[in-house]
Amino acid sequence: MRTAGTAEQDALHEAAAERPSGDGAFSITLENFDGPFDLLLRLIAKHELDITEVALSAVTDEFIRYVRALDGAEQLDRASEFLVVAATLLDMKIVGLLPQGELVDAEDVAALEARDLLFARLLQYRAFKLASQWFGTRFDQETGRHWRSVRLEDRFRRQTPDLVWTTSPEDFAALAALAFAPKAIPVVGLEHLHAPLVSIREQAAEVAALLRRGEPLTFRQLIAGVEQKGVIVARFLAVLELYRGAAVSFEQLEPLGELTVRWTAEHWSDDALANLGADYDN
Amino acid sequence: MTTEPIAPIDLERRVEAVLMVADEPQSLVTLATALGAPVPAVRQSVERLVADYDGEAGGPRRGFELREVGGGWRIYVRPEHDEVVREFVLTQTPTRLSQAALETLAVVAYKQPISRPQIAAVRSVNVDSVVKTLVGRGLIQEAFTDPETGAIHYETTDLLLVQLGINSIEELPRVAPLLEDGRDGFDVDA
Amino acid sequence: MTTEPIAPIDLERRVEAVLMVADEPQSLVTLATALGAPVPAVRQSVERLVADYDGEAGGPRRGFELREVGGGWRIYVRPEHDEVVREFVLTQTPTRLSQAALETLAVVAYKQPISRPQIAAVRSVNVDSVVKTLVGRGLIQEAFTDPETGAIHYETTDLLLVQLGINSIEELPRVAPLLEDGRDGFDVDA
């Protein structure tokens, strides 16, 4: 079994800051932590596994346990980020438990393909993580360098063309307001849903607004008056996303029958919409 | 009006003179335009000045050097004197980039032009605020907007090259070895 | 602790390194303090550099020269290259301020007097070169130097008022984010 470079491994170990929690279960602090791939890399480093090694069941267990621990209300949106990775790992674990040798059915093949895809993305993620170290080092080196950039000699300064000034006091004040405005305004990240597309997030907001009045509604009622097919699809996906976020529950008495949706979230904040539907952003 | 060709030695002195007032790296083309000399002649002059300041033309190794950075030439203090100079000029160093920002920057640098959703897919997290930071620092900029999806694509700027102390994006270390199944790639820096 | 005396040749290199990045003429005393060398040694180094750049030490007569102005030493373009340099400066100087320069100017206007690090904190970028441009354009000027930190504080000039077509900085429209933290920047003397 190959292990990753030791220097990097040490760094990963440090960053992971693992500690046994009260019940003895493994846990990882969220500080300086950067999403599912990061977690996966840290778990792999902790077990000194080559990331192409299939014997990942220990890592899978920890990963799944971690995802389960995310189950707090404020972590719901985060947890959704992990679902794809977690599902892939579970598939891999199932394949790992099967007798080695022949692959019997398409599901196993799909799991292996998913594994390859996961590894490919993990490798890519790790490659850029390593490349970023080079960036960091270069930035630090160059910050210490000094270059000649001195005030222009007076005799040349007098020769420079006059400034063309077109800014009114009002524009000037607007510029100041822009500069003084707090930089990181917490916004719902709708920007990466682009103009012609239908926003699942917006549709989710619609659905939430309709359902939060209290009365359960059928899906038919939820799409009443909507004519564009895209909007109907997005609204349906939004319902599924809200279900995934434990904000709504379904009732369907018979297959293909009327679907009744009920608002069930006790603590709801519109912030939860921020990451909703992120999987559809591509 | 015909212009006399400038003797090489004079051209070197003129390049030197212009570099004394320039506050950005100067490309050979800009220098050639300003000096009314052909680009190859300017290139030779610059090369001779580099050697000259490096002490390879009979003179001393100067306390300064001529460096190509971000697609242009600029006078730098030689690294061994940076410490002395630091105590001297009060420059203000920018705050360091976060690890997340560095990693996002690396993704953009190697995969440009790239859209935010594409960056997010590589990073597996939401990158909106980090992209905003990098644009604000002038390290990346909008390249174009995809007419179909409306997605803004980003590319790196010349300022990034200057701050990395490199001359073109091709000077970045190759990322391919890092992507190969982990055999050698990950040991590169060990 | 005793310090090794610096060899004359090394001292020359350090002096030229400092002079390459220094904005203002530097007195021998300032140089000596910064370099940790005795004033007479620095004087000799400066004298040798003057001769060196003038081509009297075996090397070429440089495109730049070391001149004493107002009690200090600074590197200037040699007058015989003035014309070329003037041409270069003309083509390089834009007639409009960049967006970054305008925003920085707005920050100074509303928060003056303000130091470079303070401006950088608001703008969250390095503002050294932009401040230099604004000073060069005569739109801002040094107000005072903080005796403790040594940080230069900047204020706007009458030229800015003229450009904006107003009589005093109080005539600028009020800005909401400034009002929120209780002081709008203009109530200081109210």
Image (cartoon, coloured by chain):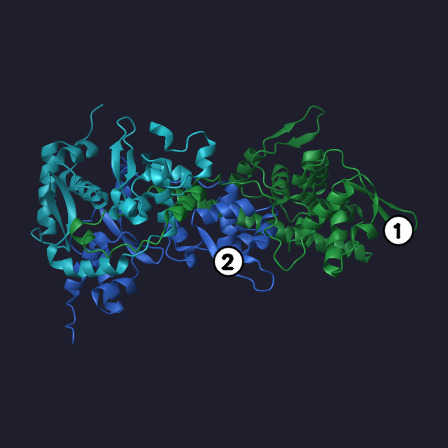
Chain colours: A green, B blue, C cyan
Above or below for B152 versus A41: below
Above or below for A76 versus B141: above
The answer as to whether the residues below labels 2 and 1 share one chain is no
Q: Residue at x 28, y 29 (%)?
A: C146
Q: Residue furthest bottom?
A: B1
Residue C130 picture location, percent across and down: 32, 46
Type of residue at label 1? Glu
In the drawing, what numbered circle is on residue A258?
Answer: 1
Q: Residue furthest left?
A: C56
What residue sits right under mark 2 in the picture? B112
Residue C66 picture location, percent across and down: 13, 47
Residue B120 picture location, percent across and down: 59, 50
Residue B74 picture location, percent across and down: 28, 53
Question: How dense is the environment of label 1, judged by Cα within 10 Å: few (below 14), some, or many (20 and up)?
Answer: few
Q: Pointer 1 indicates a residue of which chain? A: A
Q: In the structure shown, which secondary structural element does the residue marked by tag 1 occupy?
A: loop
Q: Is residue B124 left or right of residue A250?
A: left
Q: Quadrant of residue A39?
A: top right
